[in-house]
């Protein structure tokens, strides 16, 4: 089945979105196979540097979300109904896509449309949104603040304004964040749709669910 295989790295890993696209309301179609190198894993010295948080120009998270709000299974971060709203009828159950350098993650897809997207928890390095500013910002042609999303600071980055691939990262605390990685269908790409739009909307839904889990 078509899939988005995304290591949504914000400078912690390589973002690779391969073999399909993502759209809302089931509007998704396959794209050509591609692998987009956004950034690389920081050196061990950078990870172990003990930099005070936040750093590299990242904003502080004034009202952090308890980390206990993150489910042990990242595939539980969206309800089946929400996934179907995003991918349309026939959306699959989530499939774990964890990354040691980043944290737990989950992919969703649709066999009929070949659409898909990924949500990742950025919990491994304890740098939160600061990692995006430190590692993704200098390597991304487009890097912009798009928050607040559900009250939390957020950034979006991609290789160009018309890039069909976009990553949105939301800082839930100074030490951890979540991200959504999506790719547009060819139809939406040809229509000039900003690929960060769907990523922002999915991120808002995810964070809203996490706030509900935290009782906020």
Image (spheres, helix red, strand yellow):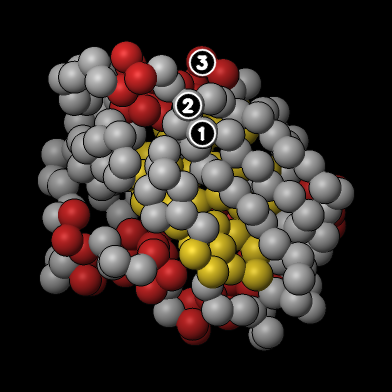
Rounded to the nearest angstrom, the CA distance separating label 2 from label 3 is 14 Å
Measured from the top left, where is residue 91 in percent x and y?
63, 79
- Quadrant for residue 86, please give it: bottom right
Residue 171's place in the image compared with 98, above or below, is above
User: Could you tell whether 14 is left or right of 96 in the image?
Assistant: right
Q: Say which residue label 1 marks.
A: 13
Residue 178's place in the image compared with 125, above or below, is below
Measured from the top left, where is residue 102 in percent x and y?
41, 42
Residue at 49% of width from left, 77% of height from top?
82
Residues tagged 3 and 1 counted as in contact (Cβ below 8 A): no
Towards the viewer: 39 or 88:
39
Residue 57 can be seen, yes or no: no
Q: Which mark is residue 200?
A: none
For numbered disc 1, what is the local secondary structure? loop
Q: Quadrant of the C terminus?
A: bottom left
Neighbour class for label 2 at 10 Å: few (<14), some, many (≥20)?
some
Measured from the top left, where is residue 17 in percent x and y?
68, 47
For numbered disc 2, what is the local secondary structure? loop
User: Could you tell whether 120 is left or right of 3 in the image?
Assistant: left
Neighbour class for label 3 at 10 Å: few (<14), some, many (≥20)?
some
User: Could you tell whether 90 is left or right of 40 in the image?
Assistant: right
Residue 216 can be seen, yes or no: yes
Residue at 73% of width from left, 57% of height from top?
21
- Quadrant for residue 36, please give it: top right
Measured from the top left, where is residue 137 in percent x and y?
48, 21
Q: Which mark is residue 138?
A: 3
Residue at 32% of width from left, 14% of height from top?
45
Rounded to the nearest angstrom, the CA distance separating label 3 from label 1 is 14 Å
Q: Say which residue label 2 marks.
A: 41
Mark 2 vs 3, N-terminal side = 2
Residues tagged 2 and 1 counted as in contact (Cβ below 8 A): yes
Residue at 21% of width from left, 63% of height from top?
69
């Amino acid at each position: 089945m078509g899939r988005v295989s995304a290591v949504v790295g914000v400078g912690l890993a390589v973002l690779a979105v391969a073999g399909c696209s993502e759209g809302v309301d089931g509007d998704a179609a396959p794209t050509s196979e591609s692998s987009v190198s956004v950034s690389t894993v920081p050196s061990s010295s950078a990870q172990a540097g003990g930099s005070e948080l936040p750093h590299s120009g990242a904003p502080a998270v004034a009202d952090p979300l308890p980390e206990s709000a993150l489910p042990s299974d990242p595939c539980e971060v969206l309800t089946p109904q929400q996934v179907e709203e995003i991918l349309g009828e026939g959306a699959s159950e989530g499939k774990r896509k964890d990354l040691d350098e980043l944290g737990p993650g989950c992919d969703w897809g649709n066999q009929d449309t070949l659409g898909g997207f990924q949500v990742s928890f950025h919990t491994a390095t304890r740098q939160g949104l600061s990692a995006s500013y430190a590692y993704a910002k200098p390597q991304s042609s487009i890097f912009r603040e798009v928050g607040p999303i559900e009250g939390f600071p957020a950034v979006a980055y991609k290789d160009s304004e018309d890039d069909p691939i976009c990553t949105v990262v939301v800082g839930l605390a100074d030490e951890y964040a979540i991200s959504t990685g999506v790719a547009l269908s060819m139809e939406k790409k040809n229509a000039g749709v900003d690929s960060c739009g769907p990523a922002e909307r999915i991120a808002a839904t995810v964070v809203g669910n996490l706030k509900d889990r935290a009782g906020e």
